[in-house]
Image (cartoon, grey):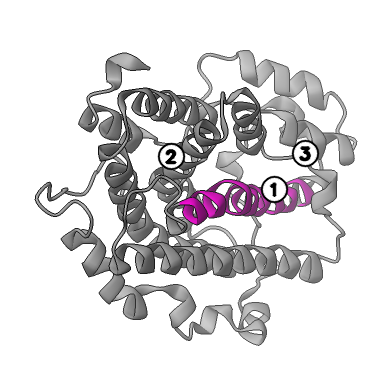
Amino acid sequence: MSGHVPEHDASDPVETAVIRGLVRSWPRRATVRRTEPELDAPTMDDLYDDNCVDYPEVLLPFAGHPVWERLDEGVRSRILAWAWIAYNKNVVDIEQDVVTPGFGLLFRDAFGTGFSDAGRAAVVQSMVDEEYHTLMHLNASALTRRRRGWALPDAALPETSTVRRHREALSRAESARAAALTTLAYATVAETSIADYLTLIADDRTIQPVHQATIALHRRDERAHASVASEMIAMVHDRLDRHDRNILARALRDGVDAFTATDGTTWSAILSVEQVPDGDAMLREVAEDPDRPRFLQDCSTADLLLARFGALDRC
């Protein structure tokens, strides 16, 4: 869904065909409404292959670095498992601390938009999906700990950088309404870009089959959520005054910056826990290497929304 904004019917701004269609299709497409054999606990254990890695090595920011290459296979395997735990934690943190609060504001019609029954149903369906996604990722981490026999506690990892950036943005908000608009903007950036983040693993057949299947299922739902989020923020925007539109535009741009920023704190924590010699030096070197590939989340849909709002020059 990255780079695409659904068409908006200006003659019917409250209940668009996109929203109605998504509401009708939810029983057929939503993971939570389906009996997926991949999600049954016995099957998950059966799918787990002790000889497969838990996370794609190519996605490590230090892949190929001499320090990484010198590590023995046991340590490398643990770091890849840690990377998978951190990936799940990142998704859960964003779902719980950014996306769900944003959808909650829409459900309560916090901005006086006047959503139809279909609009509110689409929001609630998305909220149900998000809670189920959280459960999916929690189960995925629990499975890894159980099968590997390693503790790998979430508590050893720092808070996700985007959640920190969201909280900082809220602390700068001039009013409760500005804070609500900020949360809506961040949630929209999250929902219109997360499918790209999930794709990094959803199409990778070299890792644990159960991990790949979990992410693929999550991505299927998020493609629909991108449409819901885009349509809802457009409906809200159309009813805001100029002042609030400026706040929303700035928050969207700040959200993009947050979701595309490079943050090494999680990797630093993992390497510290594993007592990797010269780990911090390795992270500094890869961060300063201009030729090293960067895996940045695609937030281009937010740019398209800003263009649609005529706000690109106001950010």
Local secondary structure at mark 1: helix
CA–CA distance in space, label 2 to label 3: 22 Å
The image shows a total of numbered marks equal to 3
What's the residue at 51%, 35% (across, down)? 177
Residue at numbered disc 3: 158
Disc assigned to residue 86: 1
**Disc 3 on helix, strand or loop?**
loop
**6 displayed left or right of 99:** left
Q: In the displayed structure, would residue 54 be above or below residue 142? A: above
Residue drawn at (48%, 32%) of the image: 296
| Label at residue 114 | none
Q: Residue at x 72, y 70 (%)?
A: 143
Of 134 and 169, the residue lying toward us = 169
Give the labeled residue for mark 2: 189
* Disc on the earlier residue, 2 or 3: 3
The reply, left or right, for residue 197 in relation to residue 173 is left
Q: Quadrant of the C terminus?
A: top left
| Camera-nearest residue between 227 and 245 | 245
Which residues, given as a range, are shown in magenta? 78-105
Question: How many C-alpha atoms fall within 10 Å of the one at disc 2: few (<14), some, or many (≥20)?
Answer: many
Q: Callout 3, which amino acid?
A: Pro
Mark 2 falls on what kind of element? helix
